[in-house]
Amino acid sequence: MPTLHIPAVLFHLSNDEKEIVVEGNNLRAIFRKVSELYPDLVDRIIQDDSLRPDIAVAIDGTILEDGNLIQPLSADAQIYLVPPIGGG
């Protein structure tokens, strides 16, 4: 299952979980599942059904350039939330 890695600056929104493993074949499905567990975390990531401009996402080491939440994910995808430098 894909793993969502949480940056330290957002630990407080995930009950200090550093990684969240959930089923999903695209980012939208992943964030939907995560929102069931940690709605405040997803509110910090998603705005109006798109990634917030101050958060980037890297999938398997590559920054997602277009914010495409329906991009297919592999079953073992590693998803990293990338806050702005300084944790802003």
Image (tube, rainbow, N blue to C red):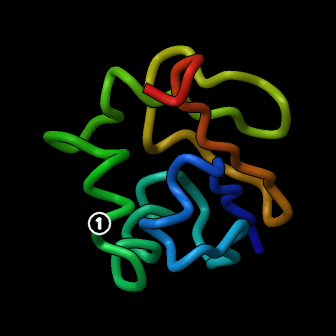
Report the front residue among 8 and 77.
8
The residue depicted at 59 percent of the width and 17 percent of the height is 85
On the image, the x and y values in percent for residue 30 come to 51, 64
Residue occupying image coordinates x 42% and y 66%: 13
- Position of 60 compared to 18: left or right? right
Residue at image position (56%, 62%) is 11
Query: Residue beneath label 1, please?
Result: 40
Q: Quadrant of residue 25?
A: bottom right
Say left or right for 84 vs 4: left
In what quadrant of the picture does the C terminus appear?
A: top left
Q: Amino acid at mark 1?
A: Asp
Q: Residue furthest bottom?
A: 37
Question: x, y percentage for residue 17?
Answer: 64, 75
Q: Which percent across, then down, holds residue 48?
A: 14, 40
The answer to whether residue 80 is above or below residue 85 is: below
Check the image and report above or below for 17 versus 88. Answer: below
Looking at the rendered image, the quarter that the N terminus falls into is bottom right
Q: Is residue 43 above or below residue 85?
A: below
* Residue 33 position in % (x across, y down): 44, 77
Q: How many marks?
A: 1
Q: Residue furthest left?
A: 48
Residue 68 to residue 8: above or below: above
How packed mark 1 is, by other alpha carbons closer than 10 Å (few <14, some 14-19, many 20 or more), is some
**Label 1 SS:** helix
- Looking at the image, which residue is at 51% across and 79% down? 15
Name the one closer to the observer, 31 or 26. Answer: 31
Residue toward you, 51 or 72: 51
85 to the left or right of 50? right
